Protein backbone atom coordinates (compact mmCIF):
# COMPACT_ATOMS: atom_id res chain seq x y z
CA UNK A 1 0.00 0.00 0.00
CA UNK A 2 1.27 3.52 -0.69
CA UNK A 3 2.62 5.67 2.11
CA UNK A 4 -0.13 7.91 3.51
CA UNK A 5 2.28 10.43 5.01
CA UNK A 6 2.94 12.75 2.07
CA UNK A 7 5.30 15.08 3.92
CA UNK A 8 7.80 13.29 6.18
CA UNK A 9 8.14 14.74 9.66
CA UNK A 10 11.28 16.77 10.32
CA UNK A 11 10.95 16.49 14.11
CA UNK A 12 14.33 16.30 15.83
CA UNK A 13 15.21 13.90 18.64
CA UNK A 14 15.05 16.79 21.13
CA UNK A 15 11.58 17.75 19.95
CA UNK A 16 10.44 14.13 20.18
CA UNK A 17 11.65 13.90 23.78
CA UNK A 18 9.81 17.14 24.53
CA UNK A 19 6.59 15.61 23.18
CA UNK A 20 6.88 12.68 25.60
CA UNK A 21 7.61 14.99 28.52
CA UNK A 22 4.50 16.94 27.57
CA UNK A 23 2.47 13.73 27.65
CA UNK A 24 3.93 12.73 31.02
CA UNK A 25 2.92 16.13 32.35
CA UNK A 26 -0.68 15.55 31.18
CA UNK A 27 -2.02 14.06 34.41
CA UNK A 28 -5.39 13.17 32.93
CA UNK A 29 -3.85 11.27 30.03
CA UNK A 30 -1.28 9.53 32.22
CA UNK A 31 -3.88 8.62 34.83
CA UNK A 32 -6.18 7.06 32.25
CA UNK A 33 -3.27 5.26 30.56
CA UNK A 34 -2.17 3.69 33.84
CA UNK A 35 -5.72 2.90 34.90
CA UNK A 36 -6.75 1.26 31.65
CA UNK A 37 -3.55 -0.80 31.50
CA UNK A 38 -4.10 -2.53 34.85
CA UNK A 39 -6.32 -5.12 33.19
CA UNK A 40 -3.30 -6.68 31.45
CA UNK A 41 -2.08 -8.20 34.73
CA UNK A 42 -4.08 -11.46 34.66
CA UNK A 43 -3.70 -11.71 30.89
CA UNK A 44 0.10 -11.58 30.84
CA UNK A 45 0.45 -13.63 34.02
CA UNK A 46 -1.48 -16.36 32.22
CA UNK A 47 0.81 -16.07 29.19
CA UNK A 48 3.86 -16.35 31.43
CA UNK A 49 2.61 -19.13 33.69
CA UNK A 50 0.20 -21.25 31.65
CA UNK A 51 2.83 -23.66 30.24
CA UNK A 52 4.12 -24.46 33.73
CA UNK A 53 0.57 -24.87 35.06
CA UNK A 54 -0.85 -27.02 32.29
CA UNK A 55 2.21 -29.16 31.47
CA UNK A 56 4.31 -29.37 34.64
CA UNK A 57 1.68 -29.10 37.36
CA UNK A 58 -1.42 -30.58 35.71
CA UNK A 59 0.45 -33.11 33.58
CA UNK A 60 -1.09 -32.25 30.19
CA UNK A 61 0.77 -32.84 26.95
CA UNK A 62 2.24 -30.00 24.94
CA UNK A 63 -0.41 -30.52 22.27
CA UNK A 64 -3.30 -30.32 24.74
CA UNK A 65 -1.70 -27.25 26.28
CA UNK A 66 -1.71 -25.67 22.82
CA UNK A 67 -5.45 -26.27 22.53
CA UNK A 68 -6.15 -24.68 25.91
CA UNK A 69 -3.89 -21.74 25.08
CA UNK A 70 -5.56 -21.23 21.70
CA UNK A 71 -8.94 -20.85 23.41
CA UNK A 72 -7.75 -17.57 24.91
CA UNK A 73 -6.51 -16.21 21.59
CA UNK A 74 -9.91 -16.97 20.07
CA UNK A 75 -11.65 -15.40 23.09
CA UNK A 76 -9.74 -12.13 22.65
CA UNK A 77 -10.65 -12.01 18.97
CA UNK A 78 -14.27 -12.80 19.80
CA UNK A 79 -14.32 -10.00 22.38
CA UNK A 80 -12.94 -7.48 19.91
CA UNK A 81 -15.44 -8.63 17.29
CA UNK A 82 -18.29 -8.33 19.80
CA UNK A 83 -17.10 -4.81 20.63
CA UNK A 84 -17.54 -3.71 17.03
CA UNK A 85 -21.09 -5.07 17.01
CA UNK A 86 -22.17 -3.86 20.46
CA UNK A 87 -20.53 -0.42 20.62
CA UNK A 88 -23.29 1.34 18.70
CA UNK A 89 -25.97 -0.52 20.64
CA UNK A 90 -24.69 -0.21 24.22
CA UNK A 91 -22.16 2.61 24.11
CA UNK A 92 -18.57 2.63 25.39
CA UNK A 93 -19.46 3.12 29.06
CA UNK A 94 -21.55 -0.04 29.28
CA UNK A 95 -19.02 -2.05 27.28
CA UNK A 96 -16.21 -1.02 29.59
CA UNK A 97 -18.35 -1.81 32.63
CA UNK A 98 -19.19 -5.26 31.23
CA UNK A 99 -15.54 -5.93 30.47
CA UNK A 100 -14.38 -5.03 33.98
CA UNK A 101 -17.22 -7.01 35.58
CA UNK A 102 -16.21 -10.03 33.48
CA UNK A 103 -12.59 -9.82 34.63
CA UNK A 104 -13.59 -9.43 38.27
CA UNK A 105 -16.14 -12.25 38.20
CA UNK A 106 -13.72 -14.59 36.41
CA UNK A 107 -10.96 -13.84 38.91
CA UNK A 108 -13.30 -14.73 41.76
CA UNK A 109 -14.41 -17.90 39.92
CA UNK A 110 -10.78 -18.91 39.45
CA UNK A 111 -10.19 -18.59 43.18
CA UNK A 112 -12.99 -21.10 43.86
CA UNK A 113 -11.24 -23.66 41.59
CA UNK A 114 -14.50 -24.88 40.13
CA UNK A 115 -14.60 -26.89 38.00
CA UNK A 116 -11.51 -28.77 39.18
CA UNK A 117 -8.54 -29.60 37.00
CA UNK A 118 -7.47 -27.62 33.92
CA UNK A 119 -10.97 -26.25 33.31
CA UNK A 120 -10.76 -24.40 36.62
CA UNK A 121 -8.16 -22.20 34.94
CA UNK A 122 -9.31 -22.43 31.34
CA UNK A 123 -12.97 -21.41 31.59
CA UNK A 124 -12.48 -18.32 33.79
CA UNK A 125 -9.46 -17.35 31.68
CA UNK A 126 -11.53 -17.54 28.50
CA UNK A 127 -13.99 -15.07 30.03
CA UNK A 128 -11.12 -12.80 31.13
CA UNK A 129 -9.68 -12.90 27.61
CA UNK A 130 -13.08 -12.16 26.06
CA UNK A 131 -13.61 -9.28 28.50
CA UNK A 132 -10.12 -8.01 27.70
CA UNK A 133 -10.89 -7.99 23.98
CA UNK A 134 -14.27 -6.37 24.61
CA UNK A 135 -12.94 -3.51 26.71
CA UNK A 136 -9.60 -2.78 25.07
CA UNK A 137 -10.78 -0.80 21.98
CA UNK A 138 -13.01 1.68 23.88
CA UNK A 139 -10.44 2.02 26.68
CA UNK A 140 -7.71 2.90 24.15
CA UNK A 141 -10.02 5.45 22.57
CA UNK A 142 -10.84 6.96 25.96
CA UNK A 143 -7.15 7.38 26.79
CA UNK A 144 -6.35 9.04 23.46
CA UNK A 145 -9.28 11.44 23.85
CA UNK A 146 -7.34 13.05 26.70
CA UNK A 147 -4.83 14.63 24.29
CA UNK A 148 -5.43 17.34 21.71
CA UNK A 149 -2.29 16.65 19.65
CA UNK A 150 0.55 14.14 19.29
CA UNK A 151 -1.89 11.23 19.09
CA UNK A 152 0.81 8.97 17.62
CA UNK A 153 3.18 9.58 20.52
CA UNK A 154 0.30 9.20 22.98
CA UNK A 155 -0.55 5.83 21.46
CA UNK A 156 3.10 4.73 21.60
CA UNK A 157 3.43 5.70 25.25
CA UNK A 158 0.18 3.90 26.07
CA UNK A 159 1.47 0.68 24.49
CA UNK A 160 4.78 1.12 26.33
CA UNK A 161 2.94 1.32 29.67
CA UNK A 162 0.79 -1.61 28.65
CA UNK A 163 3.75 -3.87 27.90
CA UNK A 164 5.76 -2.74 30.93
CA UNK A 165 2.89 -3.82 33.17
CA UNK A 166 2.68 -7.00 31.12
CA UNK A 167 6.39 -7.65 31.70
CA UNK A 168 5.86 -7.10 35.42
CA UNK A 169 2.99 -9.61 35.43
CA UNK A 170 5.12 -12.23 33.65
CA UNK A 171 7.96 -11.70 36.14
CA UNK A 172 5.50 -11.85 39.03
CA UNK A 173 3.93 -15.17 37.99
CA UNK A 174 7.42 -16.66 37.51
CA UNK A 175 8.12 -16.34 41.23
CA UNK A 176 7.91 -19.49 43.33
CA UNK A 177 4.15 -19.56 43.85
CA UNK A 178 2.77 -22.82 45.19
CA UNK A 179 -0.59 -22.30 43.49
CA UNK A 180 -0.20 -20.23 40.32
CA UNK A 181 -3.87 -20.60 39.39
CA UNK A 182 -4.80 -18.88 42.63
CA UNK A 183 -2.21 -16.17 41.93
CA UNK A 184 -3.72 -15.47 38.50
CA UNK A 185 -7.17 -15.46 40.09
CA UNK A 186 -6.02 -12.91 42.65
CA UNK A 187 -4.58 -10.68 39.92
CA UNK A 188 -7.87 -10.94 38.02
CA UNK A 189 -9.91 -10.15 41.12
CA UNK A 190 -7.73 -7.23 42.18
CA UNK A 191 -7.29 -5.67 38.73
CA UNK A 192 -10.92 -6.24 37.73
CA UNK A 193 -12.21 -4.91 41.04
CA UNK A 194 -9.91 -1.89 40.98
CA UNK A 195 -10.78 -1.05 37.39
CA UNK A 196 -14.51 -1.45 37.95
CA UNK A 197 -14.42 0.75 41.06
CA UNK A 198 -12.32 3.48 39.43
CA UNK A 199 -14.41 3.38 36.27
CA UNK A 200 -17.75 3.65 38.08
CA UNK A 201 -16.42 6.50 40.22
CA UNK A 202 -15.23 8.31 37.10
CA UNK A 203 -18.50 7.73 35.26
CA UNK A 204 -20.47 9.01 38.25
CA UNK A 205 -18.24 12.04 38.65
CA UNK A 206 -18.24 12.87 34.93
CA UNK A 207 -21.99 12.42 34.62
CA UNK A 208 -21.71 12.26 30.84
CA UNK A 209 -24.18 9.48 30.15
CA UNK A 210 -23.42 6.55 27.87
CA UNK A 211 -20.25 7.82 26.24
CA UNK A 212 -17.99 9.69 28.72
CA UNK A 213 -14.73 11.20 27.56
Image (tube, rainbow, N blue to C red):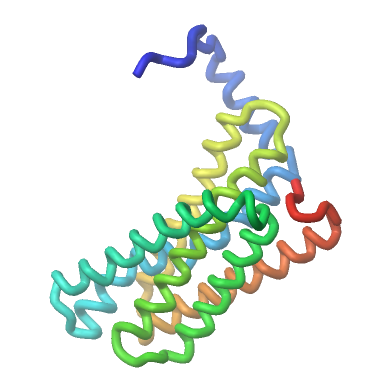
Residue drawn at (47%, 91%) of the image: 112
Residue drawn at (40%, 71%) of the image: 126
Judging depth in this view, the residue of 91 and 208 nearest the camera is 91
On screen, residue 15 versus residue 164, left or right, reads: right
Say if residue 177 shows up in the picture.
no
On screen, residue 56 versus residue 48, left or right, reads: left
Say if residue 126 shows up in the picture.
yes
On screen, residue 26 versus residue 77, left or right, reads: right
| Residue 194 position by quadrant | bottom right
Judging depth in this view, the residue of 114 and 16 nearest the camera is 114
| Residue 54 position by quadrant | bottom left
- For residue 174, above or below residue 96: below
Residue drawn at (37%, 14%) of the image: 2
So how many labels did they put on this image?
0
- For residue 160, above or below residue 64: above
Residue drawn at (80%, 55%) of the image: 209
Amino acid sequence: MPETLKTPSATSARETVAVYFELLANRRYLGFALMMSIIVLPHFSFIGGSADIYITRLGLSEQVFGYFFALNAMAIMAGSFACTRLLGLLGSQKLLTLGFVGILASGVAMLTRWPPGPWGLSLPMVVISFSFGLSRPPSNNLVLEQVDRHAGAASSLLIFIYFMLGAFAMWFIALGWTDKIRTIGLLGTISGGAMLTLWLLFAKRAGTGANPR
